[in-house]
Image (cartoon, grey):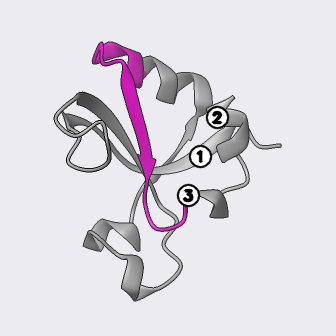
Amino acid sequence: MSSTLRITEIFFSLQGETRSVGLPTVFVRLLAALCAAVIVTPLAFNGGQVMENDDILKQVASYGAHYVTVTGGEPLAQKGLLTFIE
């Protein structure tokens, strides 16, 4: 399994959905859009950078949030996602 993911952006915000709405959350947006219907940002088709899982986790940890949301089209389209989540 891959130890890298193609990342569009990593950012800190308040969760706006689910039962954790309003909680401080780090969002890891992957570059993995399957079709135009799932695009939430133009960045989902272009750009991004390949990052090592350790580097992603360091950046996520730097925000000090207890919650992380992985998003971006279809995250499972990236082979390295399950390794990252573990």
Looking at the rendered structure, the secondary structure element under dot 1 is strand
Looking at the image, residue 54 sits to the left or right of residue 26; the answer is right
- Mark 1, Cα crowd under 10 Å, few <14 / some 14-19 / many 20+, is many
For label 1, the residue is: 5
Q: Residue at x 40, y 32 (%)?
A: 68
Looking at the rendered structure, the secondary structure element under dot 3 is helix
For label 3, the residue is: 75
Looking at the rendered structure, the secondary structure element under dot 2 is helix
Q: Residue at x 83, y 43 (%)?
A: 1
Nearer the observer, 52 or 82: 82
- Mark 3, Cα crowd under 10 Å, few <14 / some 14-19 / many 20+, is many
- Mark 2, Cα crowd under 10 Å, few <14 / some 14-19 / many 20+, is some
The answer to whether the residue labelled 2 contacts the one labelled 1, judged by CB atoms less than 8 Å apart, is: yes
Give the Cα distance between marks 3 and 2.
11 Å
Residue 75 drawn above or below residue 82? below
- Mark 2 is on which residue type? Phe
Which stretch did the figure color magenta?
59-74
Nearer the observer, 36 or 47: 36
For label 2, the residue is: 84
Give the Cα distance between marks 3 and 1.
10 Å
